[in-house]
Image: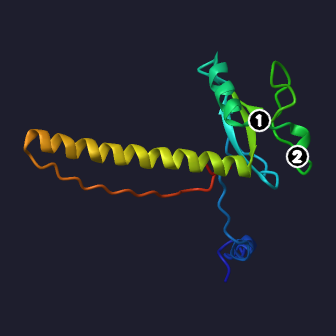
């Protein structure tokens, strides 16, 4: 096929476009993190909120067992590293520092908080039953729980 000026109506780039696979681009996440080291769990911990230092938050997490992860523990890629202040040499960005904890300690922590949650739910149920008996009115309890996970995060806690 040819047009009035003799050029082909078919563009060679049409074939190139058909051959190329469609790729979707997504922007990088601000809090991309390296893979957790074997035997460790990791999470981001805020060191500042709205530009103000939050030492209480960091020290609470450290008392729980979270320790800042040094950038030298990552060999395969470069990640943002804090180069001034208390967290020098640790992986961090935008008022956040990446922390890690041994899996055994993390599992123990999750078990502890899971048991606390069950105790609180049982106590609430008992309080409602007691209130119903005192008031003479039946309190019906219908509890449902669900969870969903979207995109997998660096932290699984």
Out of 131 and 5, give the one closest to the viewer: 131
Residue 74 horizontal/vertical position (percent): 88, 46
For the point 67% across and 56% down, the residue is: 25
Q: Which mark is residue 67?
A: 1
Please say if 144 is above or below 44: below
Query: From mark 2 to mark 1, how far is it between C-alphas?
Result: 15 Å
Q: Which mark is residue 154?
A: none
Please say if 82 is above or below 127: above
Out of 154 and 94, give the one closest to the viewer: 154
The quadrant in which the N terminus is found is bottom right
> Sequence order check: which comes first, mark 2 or mark 1?
1
Residue 47 horizontal/vertical position (percent): 68, 25
Frontmost of labels 2 and 1 is 1
Out of 40 and 134, give the one closest to the viewer: 134
Residue 17 horizontal/vertical position (percent): 70, 71
Quadrant housing residue 123 = top left
| Residue that sits furthest to the top in the current view | 52
- Helix, strand or loop status at disc 1: strand
For the point 57% across and 46% down, the residue is: 112
Task: Identify the coloring.
Answer: rainbow
For the point 87% across and 30% down, the residue is: 89
Q: Which mark is residue 74?
A: 2
């Amino acid at each position: 096929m040819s047009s009035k000026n003799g050029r082909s109506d078919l563009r060679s780039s049409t074939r190139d476009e058909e051959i190329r696979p469609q790729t979707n681009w997504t922007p990088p996440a601000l809090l991309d993190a390296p893979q957790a080291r074997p035997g460790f769990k990791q999470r981001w911990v805020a060191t500042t909120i709205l530009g103000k230092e939050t030492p209480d938050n960091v020290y609470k997490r450290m008392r729980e067992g979270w320790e800042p992860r040094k950038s030298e523990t990552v060999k395969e890629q470069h990640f943002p590293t804090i180069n001034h202040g208390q967290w020098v040499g640790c992986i961090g960005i935008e008022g956040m520092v990446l922390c890690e904890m041994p899996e055994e300690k993390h599992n123990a922590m999750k078990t502890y908080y899971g048991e606390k949650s069950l105790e609180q739910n049982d106590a609430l149920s008992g309080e409602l039953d007691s209130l119903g008996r005192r008031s003479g009115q039946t309190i019906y309890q219908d509890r449902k729980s669900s969870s969903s996970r979207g995109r997998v995060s660096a932290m699984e806690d």
